[in-house]
């Protein structure tokens, strides 16, 4: 094993112990962080059954940014350990009939993760390897580059189907990612796209035969910045993404708990209840 690989392995253990130290309410790491011999990290979401984004997973993603920045890593690829799901998006259990203090903390961590992607010192990419609805697609959009594997799954932003009005900064991020008019149509109708349609519509930048190839393509993207000073890259990215970023900052400055208020509206709680019942019914049908 080369010295660099050995160092990488040590770093990985340090990174994981760093993550675990920062999370008081979860003893299990909900993600795996490994750094390859070239200094590119792969952050693998591993919260079965569907990698839904709960408070603790968001805290661990946020901590990973800090750990990787401290390690001067070259870039980060986000992917999933699950065979058919990248992530089911926000954990509905955090949103439905919640404890308000925890819900506020949940949203502040979600926004914190968004800000870390927007202002990351290193390039980020997402290797989509399964279902990627709502908040999961937001995570993918927040990274700079998206590659999807081929497969029988869908990608997109389906918040309106759950009775949730997406935040303006997310709409701006969608308009930044794909054609503005198509973003409006997709966001309002909660349209979900197959991998090939996601490529056609600009939701993803590239398509791969499988997860391994998707990760490799993400790494190739990150390597494009090998000869570009990190700060010029991150500063340029901030400028190109200034509309969604400034919209997010304004949104948080106006009222950091806006999303809690929005989710607690009776109509939204009712819709979430119906959606959860639909999921339960689907499960019952599967098991009979
Ligand atoms: C992601 C998805 C396509 C995967 O389908 P699947 O592999 O057939 O998995 P299932 O639907 O059976 O879900 C597996 C479990 O995860 C749970 N789950 C799914 N999505 C979840 C979510 N977003 N939050 C919390 N739990 C979720 C299901 O309730 C089920 O739990 P159970 O085993 O205790 O009954 C599907 O779960 C789905 O569409 N989820 C909702 C996605 C969504 O609308 N997210 C927006 C959230 S704001």
Image (spheres, rainbow, N blue to C red):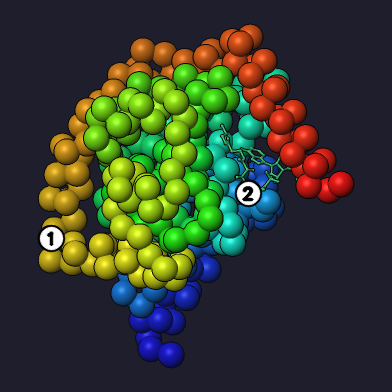
Q: Is residue 267 left or right of residue 111?
A: right
Q: Is residue 255 left or right of residue 277?
A: left
Numbered tag placed on residue 37 in the rendering = none
Q: CA distance from mark 1 to mark 2?
A: 37 Å
Residue drawn 37% across the image and 47% down it: 198
* 39 over 91 or under it: above or below: below
Q: Is residue 133 left or right of residue 229?
A: right
- The answer to whether the beta carbon of the residue marked 2 is less than 8 Å from any atom of ligand 1 is yes
* 68 over 165 or under it: above or below: below
Residue drawn 45% across the image and 68% down it: 210
Q: Is residue 212 left or right of residue 32?
A: left
Report x, y in % for residue 148: 40, 57
Choose between 65 and 44: the one closer to the eye. Answer: 44
Residue drawn 43% across the image and 43% down it: 193
Residue carrying label 2:
50
Report x, y in % for residue 81: 57, 61
Residue carrying label 1:
228
Choose between 126 and 37: the one closer to the eye. Answer: 126
Question: Which mark's residue is nearer the viewer, 1 or 2?
Answer: 2
Report x, y in % for residue 85: 57, 53
Q: Image quadrant of residue 112?
A: top left
Q: Secondary structure at mark 1?
A: loop
Give neighbour class at mark 2: few <14, some 14-19, many 20+ (Cα, 10 Å). many
Q: Secondary structure at mark 2?
A: loop
Ligand 1's quadrant is top right
Q: Are marks 1 and 2 in contact (CB under 8 Å)?
A: no
If the image is split into quadrants, where does the N terminus sit? bottom left
* 227 over 254 or under it: above or below: below
Q: Please, which residue is most extreme toward the right here? A: 288
Residue drawn 41% across the image and 77% down it: 7
Q: Earlier in the sequence, mark 1 or mark 2?
A: 2
């Amino acid at each position: 094993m080369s010295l660099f690989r050995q160092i990488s392995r040590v770093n990985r253990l340090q990174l994981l112990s760093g993550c675990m130290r920062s999370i008081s309410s979860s003893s299990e790491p909900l993600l795996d962080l490994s750094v390859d011999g070239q200094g590119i990290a792969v952050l693998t979401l591993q919260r079965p059954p569907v990698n839904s984004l709960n408070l603790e997973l968001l805290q661990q993603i946020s901590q990973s940014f800090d750990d990787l920045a401290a390690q001067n890593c070259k870039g980060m690829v986000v992917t999933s350990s699950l065979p058919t799901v990248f992530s089911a998006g926000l954990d509905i259990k955090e949103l439905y009939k919640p404890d308000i203090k925890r819900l506020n903390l949940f949203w502040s961590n979600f926004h914190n993760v968004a800000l870390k992607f927007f202002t990351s010192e290193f390039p980020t990419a997402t290797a989509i390897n399964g279902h990627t609805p709502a908040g999961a697609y937001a995570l993918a959009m927040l990274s700079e580059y998206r590659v999807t594997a081929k497969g029988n799954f869908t990608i997109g932003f389906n918040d309106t189907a759950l009775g949730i009005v997406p935040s303006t900064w997310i709409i701006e991020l969608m308009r930044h990612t794909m054609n503005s008019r198509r973003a409006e149509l997709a966001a309002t109708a909660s349209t979900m796209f197959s991998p090939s349609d996601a490529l056609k519509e600009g939701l993803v930048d590239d398509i791969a035969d499988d997860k391994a190839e998707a990760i490799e393509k993400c790494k190739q993207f990150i390597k494009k910045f090998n000869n570009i000073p990190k700060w010029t890259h991150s500063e340029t990215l901030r400028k190109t993404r200034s509309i969604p970023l400034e919209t997010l900052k304004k949104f948080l400055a106006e009222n950091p708990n806006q999303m809690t208020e929005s989710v607690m509206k009776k109509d939204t709680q009712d819709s979430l209840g119906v959606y959860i019942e639909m999921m339960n019914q689907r499960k019952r049908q599967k098991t009979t």
